Image (cartoon, rainbow, N blue to C red):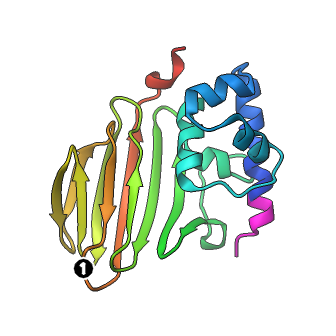
Amino acid sequence: MEDPELITQAIANNVRAQRAHRGLTLDALAARSGVSRGMLVQVEQGRTNPSVTTLTRIASALGVTVARLVEVADVPMVRVVDKTDVVTFRQGDVQARLLVGADMPLILELWDWRLAPGEHHDGDAHPPGTREMLTVLAGELTLSVYGKSHVIGKDDAVLFTADRPHVYANRAEEELRFIMVVAEPREAHDSA
């Protein structure tokens, strides 16, 4: 079972190290990420457990995956992630589990999402060129992109450009579960 304090400290260390590696000040990272300087200070000092949205914004601004920010140890050539090491984010009846991620040669993340009936998650726009693909394991997903909704049923899959805001919603009567891969080009982050 994951230790929340260990993960919070890993996030603090990783954000601070990634920011220092890029020579960014807290103010510069705040401007790039849209996360307030105060929140960044709390994250880097391990005084808060940031939301998925906050971590996604910080990761995008730093040009790394969310997985890199929550990673407790170095990544070996072959990485097996034990189920007890999977990081889980919860917000009400929405649960997102970051199963594994990588940031070379492109940024990849594998997620396992669960949404209770009536729940939704608002996804921020990712950097240009980012794509998401997912498959529904149980229930029915209503995916909204560019103001248009698409219903994805059990065992169906979808691929979409995720460089604009998007919403995952469960408008059905049963729990929704889907597996998602986020693929983000590295070059989108290396400028600036």
The answer to whether residue 5 is left or right of residue 180 is right
Q: Name the outermost residue toward the bottom.
A: 173
Q: Which quadrant is the N terminus positioned in? A: bottom right
User: Can residue 48 be seen in the rendering of this structure?
Assistant: yes
> What residue lies at 58% left-to-right and 67% top-to-bottom?
88
Q: Position of residue 25 (x, y in %)?
A: 74, 22
Quadrant (top left, top right, bottom left, bottom right) of the C terminus: top right
Provide the residue span drawn in magenta. Answer: 1-7
The disc labelled 1 sits on which kind of residue?
Ala
Q: Residue furthest top?
A: 192
**x, y (%) of residue 127?**
41, 32
Classify residue 99 as left or right of residue 19: left
Q: Residues within 10 Å of mark 1 (few under 14, many from 20)?
A: some
Residue 76 showing in the rendered view: no
Residue at coordinates 37% horizontally, 72% vertically from top-left? 119
Looking at the rendered structure, the secondary structure element under dot 1 is loop
Query: At 58% across and 39% down in the image, what residue appears?
Result: 59
Magenta-span inclusion, residue 3: yes
Q: Nearer the viewer, residue 25 or 11?
A: 25
How many numbered marks are there?
1
Q: Is residue 131 left or right of residue 13?
A: left
Q: Position of residue 49 (x, y in %)?
A: 70, 58
Q: Quadrant of residue 122?
A: bottom left
Instruction: Please name the residue that numbered disc 1 is placed on.
Output: 172
Instruction: State whether residue 13 is above or below residue 4.
Output: above
Verify whether residue 111 appears in magenta. Answer: no
**Which residue is at 27% across, 69% downward?**
136
Percent across and percent down for residue 45 are 83, 46
31 over 106 or under it: above or below: above
Dividing the picture into quadrants, the one containing residue 80 is bottom right
Q: For this rendering, which residue is in front, 106 or 34?
A: 34
